[in-house]
Image: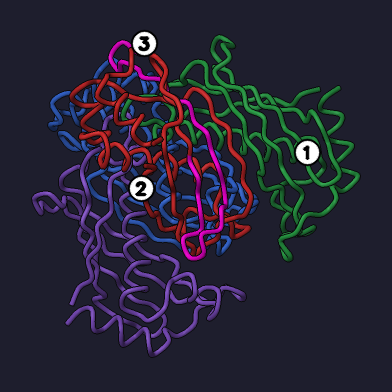
Chain colours: A green, B red, C blue, D purple
């Protein structure tokens, strides 16, 4: 089952045109991934980094932005993992305006499992592989 | 001819893993687009917004991240417009590590011309259309 | 009674030294002020700006940082208004580590009531004046 | 002699009210401090952290904001060190609008010298102590 979390649009997230600055939407995706780890993977992203010395840097990003979010909106970010490779995973995000469910953006982000000390690719640990797969069921 | 600008990697741009947080790389692209307007389009992006009430919000993004930038690096961002449609333009970015020219990321961003007061699509004004096209020659 | 809200420390909030970048702590204060408006003032900060065309830009800031927040922490931000002048208000913030209540930072921020269209000082509207005063009781 | 550097106000630095979000002004101060290290201290802040394992986290901040910076402005940030203690230094910043020199903000930031591995205070190394002192002459 996909994971979903709500993120308030902050004053600082918006640009002089009154819209959420689009790199901030990628930040919302990352925040949702952090929440996903805590809720579904049995560890926080912080502990994953500190204790297992593993991170998931982004190697590929694709996104479409349909409807702008504006100051005063709340974002609802849904995330699931559509594919788990040997040392990477593909996260699918939908960002909706929480008030009415209108889809504002979709993003597909490929994250590589990386050892943080040696900065090289490592296999996705089995426990995360399973948690990732369950999000797509 | 493509436009190129240098952007120092700031302390705040980097995450606890020591790498530039990937949404910040999109921010670098936007900063390069702002510089591109000032250098090649005969107006600043700020004046474009204030006086012509036109903005170019992002409607589609694709990016690949090859090599991480780290704190202490300087980014060199090259930008040109590969396609100009009726009311949108496709900007192509290459982000290199300035010290040795290593390509760190590539991004393709589609920007829609928007009237900021009515928040609706408008045709790309001719003067920008020409400046955009020249960047690809 | 002071208002209190929790803010998760995000990956992006932390710098390469692993600590929350100190300007982000001011951002947490602003986020808490936004929540304070929604919870205590009968309007959101977004509606205040959009409908009443009033904002509260910061004119003076003082802060002490005792203990760093790190990635993995959650911040608890307490806010109350210690003084309401004719056209300004003084907000007092305490940022604690939510897990154990350790005080990490204190900030005093003076916000001026400003008409957003004319960018000039205006009196603090009475309804906010009262809500502000109640936070200190 | 004080050190001075120019920082363009980016689209993303501005809020929906059209003004530079005030925590971003502290970010400008940090960026100026980074440039100050590179220009005056014989090392970059990045190398200071990586090679000497020393950082200068902020322990106290005071600032006044006189005139807002808006999108389209360029900031000129002047910095000097007014006091060097055993394990801290007091940096004085003036942020001006580059076009006309109007003072927009002043900030006084106390930075503590910290060993990044043990996260404890250390004496300010002599070479930086001297470079700091020269900035006030």
**Which picture quadrant has residue B55?**
top left
Residues tagged by mark 2 and mark 3 found on one chain of the structure: no
Q: Residues within 10 Å of mark 2 (few under 14, many from 20)?
A: many
Residue position for label 2: D23
- Residue B82 locus on image (x, y percent): 46, 30
Q: Residues within 10 Å of mark 1 (few under 14, many from 20)?
A: many
Q: Which residues are magenta?
A: B93-122
- Residue A1 locus on image (x, y percent): 81, 22
In the image: residue C57, left or right of residue B59 = left
* Position above or below: B108 against A65: below
Asked if the magenta segment contains residue B1, the reply would be no
Question: Mark 3, chain letter?
Answer: B
Disc 1 to disc 2, how far (Cα)?
A: 35 Å
Residue position for label 1: A89
Q: For this rendering, which residue is in front, B97 or D72?
A: B97
Point 33% across, 37% down: residue:
D11
SS at mark 1? Answer: strand
Point 16% across, 52% down: residue:
D98
Disc 3 to disc 1, how far (Cα)?
A: 36 Å
In the image: residue A47, left or right of residue A87 = left
Residue position for label 3: B120
Question: Mark 2, chain letter?
Answer: D
* Position above or below: D98 against D39: above
- Residue C61 locus on image (x, y percent): 29, 52
SS at mark 3? Answer: strand
Kindly identify which numbered label has been placed on residue C2.
Answer: none
- Main SS, magenta region, reads strand
């Amino acid at each position: 089952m996909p994971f979903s979390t709500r993120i308030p649009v902050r004053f600082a997230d918006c640009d002089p045109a009154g819209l959420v600055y689009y790199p901030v939407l990628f930040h919302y995706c990352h925040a949702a991934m952090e929440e996903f780890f805590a809720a579904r993977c049995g560890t926080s992203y912080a502990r994953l980094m500190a204790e297992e010395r593993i991170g998931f840097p982004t190697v590929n990003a694709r996104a479409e932005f349909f409807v702008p979010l504006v100051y005063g909106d709340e974002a609802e970010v849904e995330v699931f993992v559509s594919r788990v490779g040997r040392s990477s995973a593909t996260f699918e995000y939908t960002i909706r305006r929480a008030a009415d469910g209108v889809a504002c953006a979709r993003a597909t982000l490929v994250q590589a499992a990386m050892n943080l000390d040696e900065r090289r690719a490592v296999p996705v640990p089995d426990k995360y592989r399973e948690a990732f797969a369950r999000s797509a069921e």
